[in-house]
Image (tube, rainbow, N blue to C red):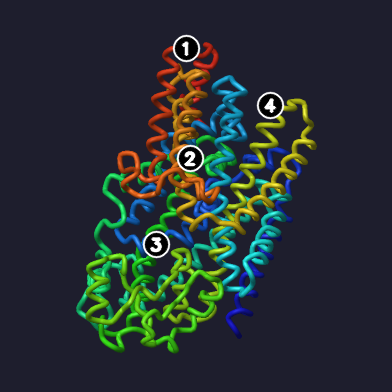
């Protein structure tokens, strides 16, 4: 059976499963639509939360980042997982005890202000829309390669599936669909990792294989990878590269507090029956996430090793050291068709050279001694590494098809959660909370479904016009969450004297400076040609790059909020008592 037919069958079966679950779990009330009737088991909710949060950036893009950044890519692992510890300890149980449907609703009630609620909605929309770009890009990449269809058809197919199980199933349908998607994606991620680890090191556990010696050689995998990269003009894999230590720390911090402030993840803790279940859900989510995140470093290193040895099967600089143009492996054909991988034989020697021509000293030596005239892998999108790795390792077609299904599941699960967050912000927080408080439950449900349909169409447009690779876009979304939502929730729970003026000023300042900083260096990211300064280290403020600036935005939020609160009237006594009561343990 051909790869394309097998892929269609595997992906089609998973889609049938998702739609079947949506039909079974269709909603009939706003409580089921927004928070699944608050009846989800904490273990299952932890699994759904893991799927909701482990997006295309985690499944498709993160291992690609680690493959090219090496040790530096650990910032993404530490930041994205560490944030769940903060969420479990500092936010989840208290927000569940407050008992609201959405994060903007909590902020509006806690700070006794519709203005605060509207600003929270704006922050949520900025975060979610930025985040959903990466998911739609992941859907397009997975469909266009494995199913051999144009990007447009792949995206439309994904949009239809999300529309069916998200619009009709609401949070209840999404929750049980995400449980199925977690099972698909974790199986799809770990199975090829087991194959490749055993293939390279003889150890079937990739976590142990990463620190093992290569089969038939008395050399560790990471040691061999370091030496090979240095031979090709790159920095060693196990050293900090491409980012200063300060930026690495700031990026980790930004991703951590950004994770703890993600509205579409926080809302999952409103779906459990009891307050203590919220903390249990966060703990189980971390366990389920760790299965993938502890595997990702091995996937990144092994995929880079396999790719380099595909391009450089012989001695560096030897006439026959590089792969011949006519002998390029079959997996490259499919990726060349997508436009995400390109080769150019610049020196017409019939071979493809892959090396760091950005290293001037090495490039000059390579030209003089080897006759190389530039890196001939002229385009290598980081987002293809996980999906391409089974083909590079020559694994069976069913494994390649399984990885495709996992990548699509990762993108669709997070996209559904984000679209529900956008929908609830518009229907519940804006329409019912501000514009038309007397709207009927049926009217609110209709508004929610219409707004979700509109959001799906908008997300599809963004997927067809992606501004960057998935993890880069998602890191910016985490920065926005760090600068706006997280500080406000923390002050709302733990500082009873924080008033509406302080909260409003803090959110506006934190989100405002972060947006300004990102548009200064990455205006092209959203509107090509509008950046004011080059996005390079010499122009960054204090050497902090855009992906790491969310931590600075959070600090601005805290400082401005406290300063304004000190100069204005304290919150009413009943609000202060409410804040105290939220933190009092209860025996349920």
Percent of width and height locating residue 429: 65, 32
User: Looking at the rendering, which quadrant does residue 259 occupy?
Assistant: top left
Label 2, label 4: how far apart the Cα atoms are: 24 Å
- Tell me which numbered mark, 2 or 4, is placed earlier along the sequence: 4
Residue positioned most to the left: 218
Task: Label 4: state its secondary structure.
Answer: helix
Reading the image, the residue beneath label 1 is 568
Of residues 546 and 258, the one drawn nearer to the viewer in this rendering: 546
Q: Nearer the viewer, mark 3 or mark 1?
A: 1
User: Looking at the rendering, which quadrant does residue 165 occupy?
Assistant: bottom right
Reading the image, the residue beneath label 3 is 296
Reading the image, the residue beneath label 2 is 480
Classify the position of the N terminus by image quarter. Answer: bottom right
- Tell me which numbered mark, 1 or 2, is placed earlier along the sequence: 2
Q: Nearer the viewer, mark 2 or mark 4?
A: 2
- Mark 3 touching mark 1, by CB under 8 A? no
Percent of width and height locating residue 130: 54, 47
Numbered tag placed on residue 434 in the rendering = 4
- Residue 182 vs residue 377: left or right? right
- Residue 374 vs residue 12: left or right? left
Looking at the image, can residue 43 be seen?
no
- Residue 209 vs residue 186: left or right? left
Task: Label 2: state its secondary structure.
Answer: helix
Above or below residue 169? Residue 144 is: below
- Tell me which numbered mark, 2 or 3, is placed earlier along the sequence: 3
Dot 4, how many residues are within 10 Å of its Cα: few (below 14), some (14-19), or many (20+)? some
- Tell me which numbered mark, 3 or 1, is placed earlier along the sequence: 3
Which residue is at a point 27% across and 65% down the rendered structure image? 359
């Amino acid at each position: 059976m051909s790869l394309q037919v097998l892929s269609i069958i595997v992906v089609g079966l998973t889609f049938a499963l998702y739609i079947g679950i949506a039909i079974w779990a269709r909603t009939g009330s706003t409580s089921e639509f927004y928070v699944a009737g608050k009846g989800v088991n904490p273990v299952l909710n932890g699994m759904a939360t893991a799927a909701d949060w482990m997006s295309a950036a985690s499944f498709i893009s993160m291992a690609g980042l680690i493959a090219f950044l090496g040790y530096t890519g650990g910032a993404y692992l530490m930041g994205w997982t560490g944030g769940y510890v903060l969420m479990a300890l500092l936010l989840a149980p208290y927000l569940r005890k407050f008992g609201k449907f959405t994060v903007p609703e909590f902020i509006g009630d806690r700070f006794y202000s519709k203005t605060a609620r509207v600003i929270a909605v704006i922050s949520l929309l900025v975060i979610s829309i930025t985040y959903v770009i990466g998911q739609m890009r992941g859907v397009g990449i997975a469909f266009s390669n494995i199913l051999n269809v144009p990007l447009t058809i792949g995206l439309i197919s994904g949009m239809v599936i999300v529309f069916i199980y998200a619009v009709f199933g609401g949070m209840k349908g999404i929750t049980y669909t995400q449980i199925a998607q977690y099972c698909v994606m974790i199986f799809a991620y770990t199975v090829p990792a087991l194959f490749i680890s055993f293939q390279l090191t003889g150890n079937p556990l990739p976590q142990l294989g990463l620190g093992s010696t290569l089969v038939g050689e008395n050399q560790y995998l990471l040691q061999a990878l370091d030496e090979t990269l240095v031979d090709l003009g790159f920095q060693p894999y196990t050293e900090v590269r491409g980012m200063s230590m300060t930026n690495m720390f700031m990026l980790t911090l930004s991703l951590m507090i950004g994770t703890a402030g993600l509205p579409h993840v926080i809302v999952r803790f409103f779906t459990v029956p009891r307050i203590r279940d919220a903390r249990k859900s966060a703990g189980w989510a971390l366990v389920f996430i760790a299965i993938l995140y502890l595997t990702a470093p091995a996937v990144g290193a092994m995929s880079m090793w396999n790719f380099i040895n595909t391009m450089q099967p012989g001695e560096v600089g030897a006439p026959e050291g590089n792969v011949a143009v006519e002998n390029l492996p079959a997996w490259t054909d499919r990726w060349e068709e997508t436009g995400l991988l390109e080769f150019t034989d610049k020196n017409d020697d019939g071979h493809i050279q892959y090396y760091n021509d950005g290293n001037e000293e090495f490039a000059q030596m390579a030209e003089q001694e080897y006759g190389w005239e530039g890196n001939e892998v002229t385009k290598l999108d980081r987002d293809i590494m996980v999906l391409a790795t089974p083909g590079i390792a020559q694994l069976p077609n069913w494994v390649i098809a399984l990885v495709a299904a996992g990548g699509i599941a990762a993108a669709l699960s997070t996209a559904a959660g984000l679209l529900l967050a956008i929908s609830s912000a518009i229907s519940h927080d804006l329409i019912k909370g501000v514009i038309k408080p007397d709207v009927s439950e049926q009217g609110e449900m209709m508004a929610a479904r219409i707004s979700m349909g509109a959001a799906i169409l908008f997300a599809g447009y963004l997927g067809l016009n992606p501004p960057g690779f998935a993890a880069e876009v998602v890191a910016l979304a985490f920065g926005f969450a760090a600068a706006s939502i997280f500080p406000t929730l923390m002050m709302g729970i733990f500082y009873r004297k924080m008033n509406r003026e302080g909260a409003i000023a803090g959110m506006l300042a934190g989100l405002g400076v972060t947006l300004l900083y990102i548009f200064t260096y990455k205006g092209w990211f959203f509107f090509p040609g509008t950046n004011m300064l080059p996005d390079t280290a010499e122009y960054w403020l204090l050497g902090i790059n855009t992906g790491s600036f969310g931590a600075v935005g959070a600090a601005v939020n805290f400082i401005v909020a406290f300063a304004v609160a000190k100069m204005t009237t304290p919150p009413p006594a009943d609000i202060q008592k409410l804040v105290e009561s939220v933190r009092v343990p209860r025996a349920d």
